[in-house]
């Protein structure tokens, strides 16, 4: 059943939603900026030496080429 709501109701609802989104974004930014020093040791993912060789794949390797695409003018 559809219940008619006054247009002001929807304006207030949008206003509250915008305020909530703004507050949510501000709290997420606060979490992203930490006063503690980073625990990152730099570089990429840690390298772990393993005795196991990497599994082979039946797919052919892509060949590196210095092919430059032609400009279509």
Image (cartoon, rainbow, N blue to C red):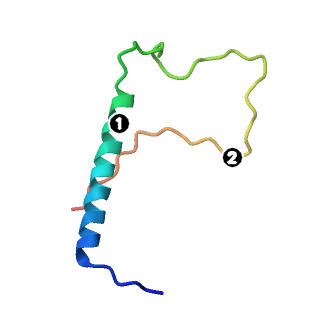
Residue at 47 percent across and 16 percent down: it is: 40
Question: Any mark on residue 59, and which?
Answer: 2
Q: Residue at x 32, y 79 (%)?
A: 5
- In this rendering, the answer to whether 26 lies above or below 15 is above
Residue at image position (58%, 18%) is 46
Task: Indicate the quadrant containing the C terminus: top left, top right, bottom left or bottom right.
Answer: bottom left
Q: Quadrant of residue 71?
A: bottom left
Closer to us: 6 or 33: 6
64 relative position to 25: left or right: right
Label 2: how many residues lie within 10 Å, few (<14), some (14-19) or many (20+)?
few
Q: Nearer the viewer, residue 15 or 3?
A: 3
Rendered image: mark on residue 39 = none
Left or right: where does residue 28 sit relative to residue 10?
right
Pinpoint residue 26: horizontal percent, then vertical percent: 30, 38
Residue in the image at 35% along x and 84% along y: 4
Callout 2–callout 1 Cβ contact below 8 Å = no
């Amino acid at each position: 059943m559809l219940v008619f709501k006054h247009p002001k109701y929807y304006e207030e609802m949008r206003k509250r939603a915008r305020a909530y989104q703004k507050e949510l974004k501000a709290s997420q930014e606060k979490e992203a900026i930490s006063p503690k020093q980073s625990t990152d040791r730099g570089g990429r993912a840690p390298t772990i030496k393993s005795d196991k060789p990497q599994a082979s794949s039946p797919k052919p390797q892509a060949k590196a080429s210095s092919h430059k695409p032609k400009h279509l003018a």
